[in-house]
Amino acid sequence: MIINTASRLGRWLHWIFEASLLIKGLLAFGEMLGGFGLLLTPNLTILRFVGWLTRHQLTQNPSEDMAIWAKHLADSFPIELQHFYAVYMLFHGTLKFTMVLMLAWRIVWAYPLAMAVLAGFVIYQMTEFFLHGGAVLLLLSGFDCFMIVLVWREYQILRLDPDLH
């Protein structure tokens, strides 16, 4: 299969690939920052902050669903779970950020690895979706599947034109 990178569609798909890398990179960096934040913020500070956020709303309307839900989540957020999420977000964000950097630098062996990592994310997210639900997991999985297609396309182009490395 010959891939025409000079066509309008080819340029458009390459632009989407680069924009997707930027989005993935920003999200991964934000995830790493969130992981550091959870790791460095004492659990009691999180509980106090959520209490401060919801206090006014619950004072005005004690049956406010969103405020009750946020308060319940904070009250059932033990330190062990906080540490798990912190480490998970750090690992997941670092892995994605590293993957994005390697693809941006056009490291050829990183493309198949990135497709495997993205497929692993899709499998995990879909497993979680079927166990617990959540439309966000479907959106993330759809985005990751689209990224797999774009990464595969870019990999084919790099393999056909060694001058692009």
Image (tube, rainbow, N blue to C red):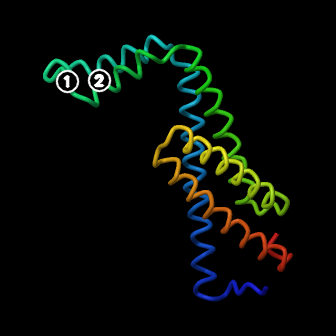
Image quadrant holding the N terminus, namely bottom right
- Residue sitting at the far front: 130
Q: Quadrant of residue 36?
A: top right
Q: In 3D space, how far apart are the residues under numbered discs 1 and 2 (Cα atoms)?
A: 7 Å
Horizontally, residue 76 falls left or right of residue 24, namely: left
Instruction: Classify mark 1: helix, strand or loop.
Output: loop
Between 150 and 42, the one nearer to me in the picture: 150
Residue bearing the label numbered 1: 63
Image quadrant holding the C terminus, namely bottom right
**Position of residue 46 measured from the top left corner of the image (x, y, whole percent):** 43, 18
Q: Residue at x 60, y 75 (%)?
A: 13
Q: Residue at x 48, y 47 (%)?
A: 136
Between 7 and 132, the one nearer to me in the picture: 132
Q: So how many labels did they put on this image?
A: 2
Q: Residue at x 77, y 69 (%)?
A: 155
**Position of residue 80 measured from the top left corner of the image (x, y, whole percent):** 59, 15
**Position of residue 133 measured from the top left corner of the image (x, y, whole percent):** 49, 42
Q: Quadrant of residue 161?
A: bottom right
The label number, if any, that marks residue 34 in the structure image = none
- Residue sitting at the far left: 60
> How many C-alpha atoms fall within 10 Å of the one at disc 1: few (<14), some, or many (≥20)?
few
Residue bearing the label numbered 2: 68
Q: In the rendered view, would you say 110 is above or below 162?
A: above
- Residue sitting at the far top: 44
Instruction: Classify mark 2: helix, strand or loop.
Output: helix
| Mark before the other along the chain sequence, 1 or 2 | 1
Q: Residue at x 54, y 44 (%)?
A: 129
Amino acid at circle 2: Ile
**Position of residue 117 measured from the top left corner of the image (x, y, whole percent):** 73, 50
Q: Given contact means CB atoms under 8 Å apart, are the residues at marks 1 and 2 in contact?
A: yes
Amino acid at circle 1: Ser
